[in-house]
Amino acid sequence: MNVDRRIKFRHLDAFSAIARARSFTAAADQLNLTQPAISKTLKELEDILDTKVLERSRSGVSLTPQGEVFLQFAEQSTAALRHGLRSIQASAGTAGRLSIGALPSVASSLLPQAVLIFAAQSPNTQVEIHEGAHLDLTTRLRSGTMDIVVGRLGKPDTMIGLIFQQLYSERVVIVARPDSPALAVRDPAELEAYRVLYPPKDAAIRPLVARMLISKGVPLFRNRIETASPVFGRAVTLADPNTVWIISQGVVADDIAKGRLKMIALDTGATEGAVGIMSRAEEIPSVAARTFTTVLQDICAIEDPKGARMDEYPE
Protein backbone atom coordinates (compact mmCIF):
# COMPACT_ATOMS: atom_id res chain seq x y z
CA MET A 1 0.00 0.00 0.00
CA ASN A 2 1.42 3.40 -0.97
CA VAL A 3 1.57 6.17 1.61
CA ASP A 4 -1.06 8.79 0.78
CA ARG A 5 0.76 12.07 0.19
CA ARG A 6 -2.22 13.97 1.57
CA ILE A 7 -1.29 12.89 5.12
CA LYS A 8 0.57 15.74 6.81
CA PHE A 9 2.25 16.26 10.17
CA ARG A 10 -0.75 18.29 11.32
CA HIS A 11 -3.07 15.31 10.77
CA LEU A 12 -0.89 12.96 12.81
CA ASP A 13 -0.20 15.52 15.55
CA ALA A 14 -3.92 16.23 15.95
CA PHE A 15 -4.81 12.54 16.05
CA SER A 16 -2.10 11.80 18.63
CA ALA A 17 -3.10 14.73 20.85
CA ILE A 18 -6.80 13.77 20.84
CA ALA A 19 -6.04 10.09 21.45
CA ARG A 20 -3.74 10.80 24.39
CA ALA A 21 -5.88 13.52 26.00
CA ARG A 22 -9.13 11.61 25.31
CA SER A 23 -10.62 15.04 24.63
CA PHE A 24 -10.97 17.30 21.60
CA THR A 25 -10.98 20.39 23.83
CA ALA A 26 -7.79 19.46 25.69
CA ALA A 27 -6.05 18.49 22.45
CA ALA A 28 -7.03 21.77 20.81
CA ASP A 29 -5.54 23.66 23.77
CA GLN A 30 -2.30 21.68 23.50
CA LEU A 31 -1.93 22.49 19.79
CA ASN A 32 -3.21 26.08 20.06
CA LEU A 33 -6.14 25.32 17.76
CA THR A 34 -9.87 25.87 18.04
CA GLN A 35 -12.05 22.82 18.63
CA PRO A 36 -13.69 23.12 15.18
CA ALA A 37 -10.23 23.28 13.56
CA ILE A 38 -8.95 20.14 15.27
CA SER A 39 -12.22 18.31 14.54
CA LYS A 40 -11.86 19.23 10.87
CA THR A 41 -8.24 18.02 10.83
CA LEU A 42 -9.25 14.66 12.30
CA LYS A 43 -12.07 14.30 9.76
CA GLU A 44 -9.60 14.96 6.95
CA LEU A 45 -7.36 12.18 8.28
CA GLU A 46 -10.24 9.71 8.58
CA ASP A 47 -11.36 10.57 5.04
CA ILE A 48 -7.84 9.95 3.73
CA LEU A 49 -7.56 6.65 5.63
CA ASP A 50 -11.14 5.73 4.73
CA THR A 51 -11.63 4.44 8.25
CA LYS A 52 -12.69 5.74 11.65
CA VAL A 53 -9.86 6.01 14.20
CA LEU A 54 -11.71 7.69 17.08
CA GLU A 55 -15.15 7.34 18.60
CA ARG A 56 -17.00 10.03 20.52
CA SER A 57 -19.41 9.10 23.30
CA ARG A 58 -20.90 10.55 26.46
CA SER A 59 -17.98 9.11 28.41
CA GLY A 60 -15.43 10.87 26.19
CA VAL A 61 -13.21 9.92 23.28
CA SER A 62 -11.89 6.42 22.64
CA LEU A 63 -9.77 4.75 19.98
CA THR A 64 -11.29 2.31 17.53
CA PRO A 65 -9.35 -0.96 16.96
CA GLN A 66 -7.95 0.62 13.79
CA GLY A 67 -7.03 3.73 15.76
CA GLU A 68 -5.18 1.69 18.39
CA VAL A 69 -2.94 0.24 15.68
CA PHE A 70 -2.50 3.48 13.77
CA LEU A 71 -1.60 5.58 16.85
CA GLN A 72 1.58 3.65 17.58
CA PHE A 73 2.88 3.93 14.02
CA ALA A 74 1.75 7.53 13.57
CA GLU A 75 3.72 8.67 16.63
CA GLN A 76 6.78 6.62 15.71
CA SER A 77 6.73 8.02 12.16
CA THR A 78 6.46 11.69 13.09
CA ALA A 79 9.11 11.34 15.78
CA ALA A 80 11.51 9.55 13.41
CA LEU A 81 11.04 12.09 10.63
CA ARG A 82 11.58 15.07 12.91
CA HIS A 83 14.61 13.41 14.46
CA GLY A 84 16.00 12.72 10.99
CA LEU A 85 15.52 16.32 9.88
CA ARG A 86 17.37 17.61 12.92
CA SER A 87 20.19 15.13 12.34
CA ILE A 88 20.59 16.31 8.75
CA GLN A 89 20.75 19.93 9.89
CA ALA A 90 23.38 19.07 12.49
CA SER A 91 25.54 17.14 9.98
CA ALA A 92 25.31 20.03 7.53
CA GLY A 93 26.83 22.37 10.07
CA THR A 94 23.58 24.13 10.88
CA ALA A 95 23.27 25.24 14.48
CA GLY A 96 21.74 22.42 16.49
CA ARG A 97 18.49 22.64 18.44
CA LEU A 98 17.41 20.99 21.67
CA SER A 99 13.76 21.16 22.64
CA ILE A 100 13.17 20.37 26.31
CA GLY A 101 9.83 19.91 28.01
CA ALA A 102 9.79 20.62 31.73
CA LEU A 103 7.22 20.15 34.44
CA PRO A 104 6.99 23.13 36.82
CA SER A 105 8.95 21.50 39.65
CA VAL A 106 12.09 21.12 37.53
CA ALA A 107 11.60 24.31 35.50
CA SER A 108 12.04 26.33 38.68
CA SER A 109 14.74 24.25 40.36
CA LEU A 110 16.96 21.85 38.42
CA LEU A 111 16.65 23.21 34.90
CA PRO A 112 18.20 26.71 35.20
CA GLN A 113 21.52 25.36 36.46
CA ALA A 114 21.54 22.54 33.90
CA VAL A 115 20.82 24.84 30.95
CA LEU A 116 23.61 27.23 31.93
CA ILE A 117 26.14 24.39 32.14
CA PHE A 118 24.92 22.93 28.85
CA ALA A 119 25.12 26.32 27.12
CA ALA A 120 28.77 26.62 28.13
CA GLN A 121 29.49 23.15 26.78
CA SER A 122 27.42 23.44 23.57
CA PRO A 123 27.37 27.15 22.64
CA ASN A 124 26.12 26.47 19.09
CA THR A 125 23.00 24.60 20.20
CA GLN A 126 19.75 26.54 20.35
CA VAL A 127 17.87 25.51 23.49
CA GLU A 128 14.07 25.72 23.72
CA ILE A 129 12.30 25.26 27.06
CA HIS A 130 8.60 24.42 27.11
CA GLU A 131 6.85 24.26 30.48
CA GLY A 132 3.56 22.44 30.73
CA ALA A 133 1.45 19.63 32.12
CA HIS A 134 2.62 16.02 31.99
CA LEU A 135 0.11 14.80 29.39
CA ASP A 136 0.77 17.72 27.05
CA LEU A 137 4.55 17.32 27.22
CA THR A 138 4.62 13.54 26.79
CA THR A 139 2.24 13.76 23.81
CA ARG A 140 4.55 16.27 22.16
CA LEU A 141 7.56 14.13 23.02
CA ARG A 142 6.06 11.13 21.24
CA SER A 143 5.32 13.20 18.15
CA GLY A 144 8.92 14.36 17.92
CA THR A 145 8.31 18.06 18.59
CA MET A 146 10.38 17.69 21.77
CA ASP A 147 13.65 15.85 22.34
CA ILE A 148 13.30 15.10 26.04
CA VAL A 149 10.96 15.86 28.93
CA VAL A 150 12.17 16.33 32.50
CA GLY A 151 9.67 15.81 35.29
CA ARG A 152 7.74 13.34 37.39
CA LEU A 153 7.10 9.79 36.30
CA GLY A 154 3.51 9.65 35.10
CA LYS A 155 0.82 7.01 35.14
CA PRO A 156 1.58 3.90 33.04
CA ASP A 157 -0.79 4.85 30.22
CA THR A 158 1.02 8.18 29.75
CA MET A 159 4.42 6.48 29.47
CA ILE A 160 3.71 4.12 26.60
CA GLY A 161 6.49 4.30 24.01
CA LEU A 162 8.77 6.26 26.36
CA ILE A 163 11.71 5.41 28.60
CA PHE A 164 12.37 7.01 31.99
CA GLN A 165 15.73 7.61 33.69
CA GLN A 166 15.30 8.59 37.34
CA LEU A 167 17.31 11.53 38.68
CA TYR A 168 15.93 11.94 42.21
CA SER A 169 12.79 11.62 44.32
CA GLU A 170 10.49 14.42 45.35
CA ARG A 171 7.37 14.74 47.46
CA VAL A 172 4.36 17.03 47.39
CA VAL A 173 4.11 19.68 50.10
CA ILE A 174 1.28 21.86 51.39
CA VAL A 175 2.31 25.49 51.89
CA ALA A 176 0.81 28.78 53.07
CA ARG A 177 1.89 32.29 53.98
CA PRO A 178 4.02 32.62 57.15
CA ASP A 179 1.13 34.40 58.90
CA SER A 180 -1.55 31.95 57.77
CA PRO A 181 -3.69 30.28 60.43
CA ALA A 182 -3.50 27.15 58.29
CA LEU A 183 0.02 26.53 59.59
CA ALA A 184 -1.60 25.24 62.79
CA VAL A 185 -3.45 22.48 60.89
CA ARG A 186 -2.45 18.96 61.96
CA ASP A 187 -5.24 16.97 60.29
CA PRO A 188 -5.70 17.25 56.48
CA ALA A 189 -9.48 17.26 56.94
CA GLU A 190 -9.10 20.70 58.56
CA LEU A 191 -7.94 22.13 55.21
CA GLU A 192 -11.60 22.16 54.17
CA ALA A 193 -11.86 25.46 56.06
CA TYR A 194 -9.42 27.11 53.63
CA ARG A 195 -9.20 27.81 49.92
CA VAL A 196 -7.13 24.95 48.49
CA LEU A 197 -5.08 25.23 45.31
CA TYR A 198 -5.27 21.66 44.02
CA PRO A 199 -3.47 19.89 41.14
CA PRO A 200 -5.68 19.52 38.02
CA LYS A 201 -6.58 16.22 36.37
CA ASP A 202 -3.67 16.26 33.92
CA ALA A 203 -1.05 16.95 36.62
CA ALA A 204 1.40 14.12 37.36
CA ILE A 205 1.00 14.65 41.12
CA ARG A 206 -2.82 14.52 41.16
CA PRO A 207 -3.14 10.71 41.62
CA LEU A 208 -0.56 10.78 44.41
CA VAL A 209 -2.36 13.58 46.26
CA ALA A 210 -5.74 11.89 45.77
CA ARG A 211 -4.46 8.56 47.16
CA MET A 212 -2.90 10.31 50.15
CA LEU A 213 -6.15 12.08 51.03
CA ILE A 214 -8.29 8.97 50.45
CA SER A 215 -6.01 6.97 52.77
CA LYS A 216 -6.73 9.54 55.49
CA GLY A 217 -10.47 9.55 54.82
CA VAL A 218 -10.49 13.10 53.43
CA PRO A 219 -12.94 13.80 50.57
CA LEU A 220 -12.07 16.06 47.64
CA PHE A 221 -12.06 19.65 48.91
CA ARG A 222 -15.13 21.64 47.89
CA ASN A 223 -13.48 25.04 48.19
CA ARG A 224 -10.67 24.32 45.72
CA ILE A 225 -9.15 25.93 42.65
CA GLU A 226 -7.50 23.45 40.30
CA THR A 227 -4.33 24.85 38.76
CA ALA A 228 -0.93 23.73 37.48
CA SER A 229 0.37 27.30 37.16
CA PRO A 230 3.23 28.13 39.56
CA VAL A 231 2.81 31.84 38.79
CA PHE A 232 -0.89 31.81 39.69
CA GLY A 233 -0.41 29.52 42.68
CA ARG A 234 2.36 31.61 44.15
CA ALA A 235 0.51 34.91 43.60
CA VAL A 236 -2.74 33.74 45.22
CA THR A 237 -1.04 32.03 48.17
CA LEU A 238 1.11 35.07 48.93
CA ALA A 239 -1.89 37.39 48.63
CA ASP A 240 -4.31 35.47 50.85
CA PRO A 241 -3.54 34.01 54.31
CA ASN A 242 -6.57 31.73 53.98
CA THR A 243 -5.24 29.96 50.89
CA VAL A 244 -3.15 26.77 51.01
CA TRP A 245 -1.28 25.33 48.04
CA ILE A 246 -0.68 21.64 47.32
CA ILE A 247 2.35 21.53 45.04
CA SER A 248 5.59 19.66 44.23
CA GLN A 249 8.34 20.67 46.63
CA GLY A 250 10.69 21.76 43.84
CA VAL A 251 8.28 24.48 42.71
CA VAL A 252 8.34 26.25 46.08
CA ALA A 253 11.78 25.26 47.38
CA ASP A 254 13.16 28.77 46.89
CA ASP A 255 10.06 30.38 48.47
CA ILE A 256 10.46 28.14 51.52
CA ALA A 257 14.21 28.79 51.79
CA LYS A 258 13.64 32.55 51.71
CA GLY A 259 10.73 32.47 54.16
CA ARG A 260 8.06 33.64 51.73
CA LEU A 261 6.08 30.42 52.22
CA LYS A 262 6.02 27.80 54.95
CA MET A 263 5.13 24.13 54.89
CA ILE A 264 2.15 22.95 56.88
CA ALA A 265 3.27 20.13 59.18
CA LEU A 266 1.29 17.33 57.56
CA ASP A 267 2.74 13.97 56.57
CA THR A 268 2.94 13.88 52.75
CA GLY A 269 5.41 10.99 52.54
CA ALA A 270 2.91 8.97 50.48
CA THR A 271 3.32 11.45 47.62
CA GLU A 272 7.04 10.68 47.17
CA GLY A 273 7.66 10.16 43.47
CA ALA A 274 10.44 9.76 40.94
CA VAL A 275 11.64 12.74 38.91
CA GLY A 276 13.67 12.02 35.80
CA ILE A 277 14.28 12.25 32.08
CA MET A 278 11.74 10.96 29.56
CA SER A 279 12.72 10.15 26.00
CA ARG A 280 11.39 8.12 23.11
CA ALA A 281 12.05 4.39 23.26
CA GLU A 282 13.98 2.69 20.46
CA GLU A 283 15.50 5.93 19.21
CA ILE A 284 19.13 6.98 19.29
CA PRO A 285 19.16 10.40 21.01
CA SER A 286 20.96 13.32 19.40
CA VAL A 287 24.39 14.43 20.61
CA ALA A 288 22.74 17.48 22.22
CA ALA A 289 20.18 15.33 24.05
CA ARG A 290 22.90 12.97 25.32
CA THR A 291 25.03 15.89 26.49
CA PHE A 292 22.13 17.50 28.34
CA THR A 293 21.19 14.19 29.93
CA THR A 294 24.76 13.83 31.24
CA VAL A 295 24.63 17.37 32.67
CA LEU A 296 21.42 16.55 34.56
CA GLN A 297 22.85 13.28 35.87
CA ASP A 298 26.06 14.97 37.01
CA ILE A 299 24.14 17.64 38.95
CA CYS A 300 21.91 15.08 40.65
CA ALA A 301 24.81 12.75 41.45
CA ILE A 302 26.15 15.46 43.76
CA GLU A 303 22.95 16.78 45.27
CA ASP A 304 19.32 17.14 44.43
CA PRO A 305 18.11 20.52 43.05
CA LYS A 306 16.84 21.62 46.47
CA GLY A 307 20.29 21.22 47.99
CA ALA A 308 19.69 18.02 49.96
CA ARG A 309 21.85 14.95 49.62
CA MET A 310 20.27 12.22 47.51
CA ASP A 311 20.56 9.65 50.32
CA GLU A 312 18.15 11.78 52.39
CA TYR A 313 15.35 10.74 50.04
CA PRO A 314 14.12 7.23 50.87
CA GLU A 315 13.09 5.01 47.97
Image (cartoon, grey):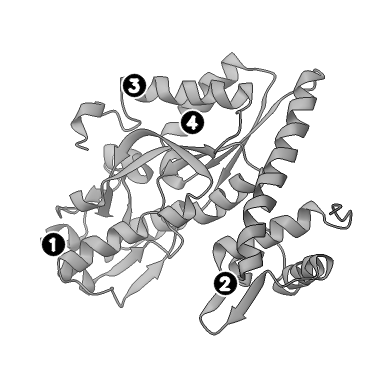
Q: CA distance from mark 3 to mark 4?
A: 17 Å
Give the mark nearest the N terminus, 3 or 2.
Answer: 2
Give me the residue at 25% from left, 70% from top.
194
Instruction: Single out the residue that lies furthest toward the top.
Output: 121
Give me the residue at 50% from left, 50% from top.
160
Give the mark nearest the N terminus, 1 or 3.
Answer: 1
* Total marks placed: 4
Contact, mark 1 vs mark 3 (Cβ under 8 Å): no
Read off the residue under disc 4.
112
Side of 149 where 12 appears, left or right: right
Q: CA distance from mark 2 to mark 1?
A: 42 Å
Give the mark nearest the N terminus, 3 or 4.
Answer: 4
Q: CA distance from mark 1 to mark 3?
A: 36 Å
Which amino acid lies under the numbered mark 4 shown in the image of this protein? Pro
Badge nearest the viewer, 1 or 3: 3
Which mark identifies residue 62?
2
Give the mark nearest the N terminus, 2 or 4.
Answer: 2
Which mark identifies residue 142?
none
Read off the residue under disc 3.
301
Side of 27 where 167 appears, left or right: left
Read off the residue under disc 1.
185
Give the mark nearest the N terminus, 2 or 1.
Answer: 2
Side of 85 where 281 appears, left or right: left
Q: Position of residue 288 (x, y in %)?
A: 62, 23
> Which quadrant, please, contains the C terminus?
top left
Q: Secondary structure at mark 3?
A: helix
Badge 1: how crowded within 10 Å, few (<14), some, or many (20+)?
A: few
Which amino acid lies under the numbered mark 1 shown in the image of this protein? Val
Q: Image height check: is 162 above or below 28?
A: above
Could one spot residue 80 in this view of the protein?
A: yes
